[in-house]
Amino acid sequence: RGLVDDVIDPADTRGVLIGALAMLRTKHADLPARKHGNPPQ
């Protein structure tokens, strides 16, 4: 879609990237519960 989240100053790029990667290091996304089990064969 090409949406812009933020515009950062080139001098601040390293700090912004380090902060974003540090946040993602501990991110955990839970998987949704399964709606259906394995069907019998």
Image (cartoon, grey):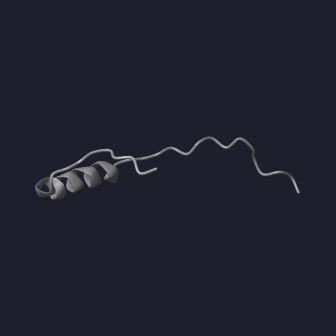
Left or right, 29 with respect to 33, comes to left
Residue 23 placed where, x, y %?
29, 48
> Extreme right residue here?
41
3 left or right of 11? Answer: right
Which residue lies at the image location 23% right of the left edge and 48% below the top edge? 7
* View extreme (left): residue: 11
Q: Residue at x 11, y 56 (%)?
A: 11
In this view, the residue in front, 27 or 19, is 19
Q: Is residue 16 left or right of residue 32?
A: left
Q: How many marks?
A: 0
In this rendering, position of residue 18 left or right of residue 26 = left
Q: Residue furthest front?
A: 2
Give the percent coordinates (x, y) of residue 40.
86, 52
Q: Residue at x 18, y 56 (%)?
A: 13
Q: Position of residue 37 (x, y in %)?
A: 75, 47
Q: Quadrant of the C terminus?
A: bottom right
**Picture residue at 39% right of the left edge, 47% below the top:** 3
* Position of residue 8 measured from the top left corner of the image (x, y, whole percent): 20, 50
